[in-house]
Amino acid sequence: MVDPERLAALGVAADLVLRALGPTADYIGNELPRWAELRRSNLQRTFEHAERKLGTEGLERSGRVSPRVLKEVLDGALYWDDSLAVEYFGGILAASKSEFHRDDRGATFASLVGQLSTYQVRAHYLAYAHARNLLVGRDFDLGVEDIRTDLRVYVPASSWEEGMAFSLAEADEFEDHIGHFSAGLFHGHGLIDKSFGGGRDPDLLSHYFEGRDFPDGGVVFMPSTRAA
């Protein structure tokens, strides 16, 4: 049965839930305790990530986090089960501590992460982890398109599947996932540049890297200015 007191604590009227859902409302009554624990756990992890990223110096530094940033972070982090996404929100929270009271730039990034799927967040992390390993220490300007074109990053299929933590069934849908990554990271939010492709077909990747062989397939992308 639906517990009216628990629903009231969430600001929800029990009779409204019953009218809207009928017998299905019993699921809410059974799940409320688990939801509350998940929310508490995610909140704890978010602040632990923020604390770790700030470090002792950052924690002692004067400043504050904009209430707008806090709202977007909490709205996003409370309902994610994926640990990497929660770490993203913790990082945004840490980076948003500022002496400038109107500095609410982190709200934009928190809202953006909240619009991505779990797959897209992990794909973003994996892509730019490989990009960093390849490009760290090099001096270049991502604002120049010709330079970005020369900075194509290749991630082998085996590394991509391992980094995405795919199950065997998910790995069988490799090409389907590529379309989802592209739709969210490029077309939706500009987090990768226009030259993006992937799959198990070596000839497809050779379109991006002429003269190179890709026996295992994989993913090729260009970093974008927005994600830099």
Image: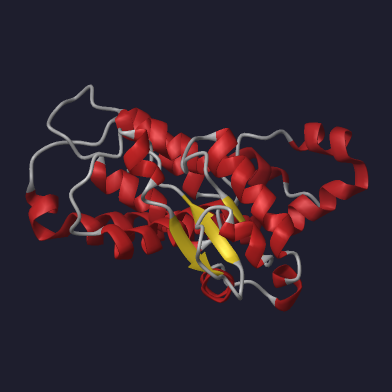
Residue 84: x percent and y percent?
46, 61
Q: Is residue 165 above or below residue 178?
A: below
Image quarter of residue 16: top right
Image quarter of residue 45: bottom left
Residue projecting furthest to the top: 102
Question: Residue placed at 51% from the left, 70% from the top?
Answer: 163
Question: Is residue 214 or residue 76 the one in the foreground?
Answer: 214
Question: Is residue 154 or residue 128 the one in the foreground?
Answer: 154
Question: Residue placed at 44% from the left, 42% from the top?
Answer: 74
Q: Is residue 64 above or below residue 140?
A: above
Decide if residue 50 is on the left or right side of residue 20: left
Residue 44 visible to the viewer: no
Question: Residue placed at 46% from the left, 41% from the top?
Answer: 191
Residue 36 visible to the viewer: yes
Q: Is residue 125 above or below residue 150?
A: below
Residue projecting furthest to the right: 23
Residue 79: x percent and y percent?
56, 50
Question: Is residue 53 or residue 14 the one in the foreground?
Answer: 53
Image quarter of residue 46: bottom left
